[in-house]
Image (spheres, coloured by chain):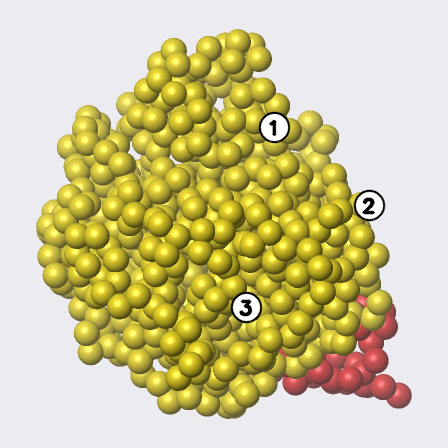
């Protein structure tokens, strides 16, 4: 089974680097429930190929491949 | 090759051909990428005397060295070209997600020359470059066109697009280039350059990686910076007291260095809108076409401009690529627009003031609506607001009449008339056609004594910050090769940047009397030179100016660049590069016949006559002496502003 990214909100900076790195654009910034600023944090949508490029692009250790 | 791609794409729309140009490493080492790379390309490929709206002008979309390397605050891109507004060097900066998309196609910049014989757009991905028909998109506003272009070109990876709106298509000289559905690289009239080439958009769909020489080092830098930003929070209720804070700032007799990380807390809450009421309270915000004060527009009049009120309908915040602060936001404007639009990007401070205090407009909902009108048209809100202010003053003085405005009552603060005039400018109808080319040209065409009310620097409308509060700002309004921009430098920024901690020559700022800032001196000039040089490095890096304001002691720009490239340069090495970039931009202007003295801000902006009320009462700025000293320390002639050694890229190429 393919591993898929899990987002660690405590570390995430909502900087959109993972979203721009994803080769199939399956990371969207839509979750506004994480902090008091209503910042849009990443969510995984359909189509993930489990390539882990998002994990390696994240400098804040906010993505863990799970599954 | 680390940090940069080493190549640019040059597209010729006249011949419908394109080529990939390799850029010598020496260009990057001596001029960086972004703004520096642009000085090389524009000087080399634009023939002297080229018509800004002709085939020979070259439009560039460039990124910086740090973009894509994991560096914090590195997602900016620049549009560059010969400006039809000023006749000289033109640049405009924007964030969002377009910057990495250029690099992911394998290029540090995409340059376009020639003119298409029909509307086209350029499509670029990892392998292909295509000039495609854009008839379908021509005539669409920038937001709708971008949505359709992305949908039509989305295969695996979602593409990004830089687009012009209808103002660019109609060659409005105050139009810009948009991305991310309404963010805009607004200044210098480069949307008109794109429109003149019949180029609706550039779509980037690449996925190439950007190499970083020391990813572990970069990761450590980014984490440390992000950690500081994350820890620094201020209560949202702070938005209600920013006016008082500004008043206190304005009243203090002293100025002193301040840790810029304070601004990160405010930016996270409010974005640039933190300044909306604060700037009115401390005197930073120009009122009534730069001639007014609190007697014309009081802090009570501005009660709806404070962030918690004007951004009351904000539904979410967002970050640009690589940003860890997140100053962007989306506001619901169904009510403000009467159902015409659902949402808009949170209006920036510049937009709020240019359509608020500058026009004595108290109706904050009208500003939200105008913001979306302008974003979709792709028109610069600073220039557009300034054009409306100019028009109102001409109306007040009897130079223009109600009939000239198609029956509109153009009294100060009449928000309905302001909206109507903005629409006329977007459509280029009636008097709007004249104003859509900026106030310098409009005032020349109107004649009489209209020039007295046209507040600009070298043809470009000045940004919404007052040099009578911060004289260094006036130096950069006047001396930057793109005049009228507020982002090149100000004492407020310098105070927070702590360059003196890593530079041997950038003067330390100490606690001192504000009145001393009005005294031109070699030390003050060295500060403005250090400021401009740093900003050029930032623009060569793809960095964000809010990152700069948080302070270089936190951002560590020189370390970021060294990690990206593998170089071992000091901050002073980079500042030298920054000066070199600035000199190359000035050399471009000299070649194009620009007289730097004519870019110096006019009497009203420098406080002649002085204001009679408010925090700037009685203040004036000895701008000519200050600019002269700035030129001297830039190694430019102190009386003419001409660099002692003009940049010669032919020589650089032949070495």
Report which residue position mark 1 lands on.
B428
- Neighbourhood count class around disc 2 (C-alpha, 10 Å): few under 14, some 14–19, many 20 upward: few
Question: In the drawing, does residue B473 fall left or right of residue B315?
Answer: left
Q: CA distance from mark 2 to mark 3?
A: 28 Å
Are marks 2 and 3 in one subunit?
yes
Q: Which residue is at a point 60% across and 51% down the rendered structure image?
A: B55
Q: Position of residue B164 (x, y in %)?
A: 65, 47
Query: Mark 2 falls within which chain?
Result: B
Q: Is residue A62 above or below residue B270?
A: below
Chain A drawing hue: red
The residue nearer to you, when weighing A4 against B4, is: B4
> Which of disc 2 and disc 1 is earlier in sequence?
2
Chain letter, yellow = B
The residue nearer to you, when weighing B507 against B103, is: B103
Report which residue position mark 3 lands on.
B63
Report which residue position mark 2 lands on.
B136
In front of the other: label 3 or label 1?
Answer: 1
Question: In the drawing, does residue B175 fall left or right of residue B472?
Answer: right
Q: Secondary structure at mark 1?
A: loop
Q: Quadrant of residue B68?
A: bottom right
In front of the other: label 2 or label 3?
Answer: 2
């Amino acid at each position: 089974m393919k591993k898929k990214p899990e987002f660690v909100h405590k570390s995430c900076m909502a900087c959109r680097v993972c979203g721009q790195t994803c080769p199939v654009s399956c990371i969207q910034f839509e979750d506004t429930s994480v902090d008091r600023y209503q910042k849009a944090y990443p969510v995984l949508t359909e189509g993930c190929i489990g390539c882990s490029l998002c994990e390696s692009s994240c400098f804040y250790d906010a993505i863990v491949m799970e599954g | 090759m680390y940090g940069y791609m080493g190549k640019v794409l040059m597209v010729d729309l006249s011949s419908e051909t394109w080529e990939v140009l390799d850029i010598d490493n020496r260009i990057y080492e001596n001029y960086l990428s972004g703004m520096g790379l642009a000085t090389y390309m524009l000087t080399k490929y634009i023939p002297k005397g080229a018509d800004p709206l002709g085939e020979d002008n070259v439009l560039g979309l460039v990124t910086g060295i740090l973009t894509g390397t994991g560096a914090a605050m590195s997602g900016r891109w620049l549009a560059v070209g010969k400006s039809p507004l000023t006749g000289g060097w033109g640049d405009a900066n924007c964030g969002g997600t377009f910057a990495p998309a250029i690099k992911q196609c394998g290029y540090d910049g995409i340059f376009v020359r020639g003119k298409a014989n029909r509307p086209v757009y350029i499509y670029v991905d990892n392998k292909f470059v295509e000039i495609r028909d854009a008839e379908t998109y021509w005539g669409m506003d920038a937001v709708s066109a971008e949505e359709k272009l992305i949908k039509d070109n989305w295969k695996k990876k979602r593409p990004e697009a830089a687009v012009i709106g209808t103002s660019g298509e109609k060659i409005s000289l105050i139009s810009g280039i948009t991305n991310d559905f309404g963010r805009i690289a607004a200044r210098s009239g480069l949307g008109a350059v794109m429109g003149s080439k019949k180029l609706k958009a550039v779509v980037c769909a690449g996925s190439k990686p950007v190499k970083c020489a020391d990813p572990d080092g970069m990761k450590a830098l980014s984490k440390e910076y992000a950690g500081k930003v994350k820890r620094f929070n201020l209560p949202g209720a702070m938005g209600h007291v920013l006016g008082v804070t500004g008043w206190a700032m304005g009243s203090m007799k002293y100025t002193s260095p301040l840790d810029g990380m304070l601004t990160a807390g405010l930016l996270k809450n409010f974005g640039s809108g933190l300044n909306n009421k604060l700037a009115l309270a401390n005197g930073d915000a120009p009122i009534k076409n730069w001639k007014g004060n609190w007697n014309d527009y009081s802090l009570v009049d501005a009660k709806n401009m404070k962030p918690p009120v004007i951004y009351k309908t904000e539904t979410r915040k967002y970050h640009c690529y690589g940003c860890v602060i997140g100053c962007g936001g989306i506001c619901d404007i169904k009510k403000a627009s009467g159902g015409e639009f659902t949402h808009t990007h949170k209006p920036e401070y510049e937009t709020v003031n240019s359509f608020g205090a500058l026009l004595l407009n108290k109706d904050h909902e009208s500003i939200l609506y105008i913001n979306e009108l302008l974003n979709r048209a792709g028109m610069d809100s600073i220039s557009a607001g300034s054009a409306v202010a100019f028009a109102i003053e001409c109306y007040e003085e009897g130079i223009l009449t109600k009939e000239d405005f198609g029956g509109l009552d153009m009294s100060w603060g009449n928000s309905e008339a302001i909206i109507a005039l903005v629409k006329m400018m977007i459509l280029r109808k009636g008097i709007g056609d004249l104003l859509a080319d900026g106030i310098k040209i409009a005032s020349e065409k109107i004649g009489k004594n209209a020039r007295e009310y046209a507040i600009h620097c070298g043809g470009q409308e000045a940004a919404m910050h007052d040099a009578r509060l911060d004289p260094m700002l006036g130096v950069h309004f006047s001396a930057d090769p793109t005049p009228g921009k507020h982002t090149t430098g100000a004492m407020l920024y310098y105070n927070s940047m702590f360059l003196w901690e890593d530079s041997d020559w950038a003067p330390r700022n100490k606690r001192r009397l504000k009145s001393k800032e009005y005294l031109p001196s070699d030390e003050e000039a060295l500060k403005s030179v250090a400021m401009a040089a740093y900003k050029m490095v930032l623009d060569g890096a793809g960095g964000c100016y809010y990152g700069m304001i948080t302070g270089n002691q936190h951002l560590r720009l020189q370390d970021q660049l060294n990690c990206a490239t593998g170089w071992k340069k000091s901050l002073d090495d980079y500042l030298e590069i920054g000066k070199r970039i600035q000199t190359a931009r000035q050399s471009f202007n000299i070649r194009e016949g620009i007289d730097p003295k004519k870019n110096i801000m006019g009497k009203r902006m420098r406080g002649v006559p002085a204001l009679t009320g408010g925090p700037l009462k009685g203040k004036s700025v000895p701008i000519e002496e200050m600019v002269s000293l700035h030129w001297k320390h830039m190694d430019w002639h102190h009386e003419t502003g001409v660099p002692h050694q003009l940049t010669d890229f032919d020589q650089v190429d032949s070495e």
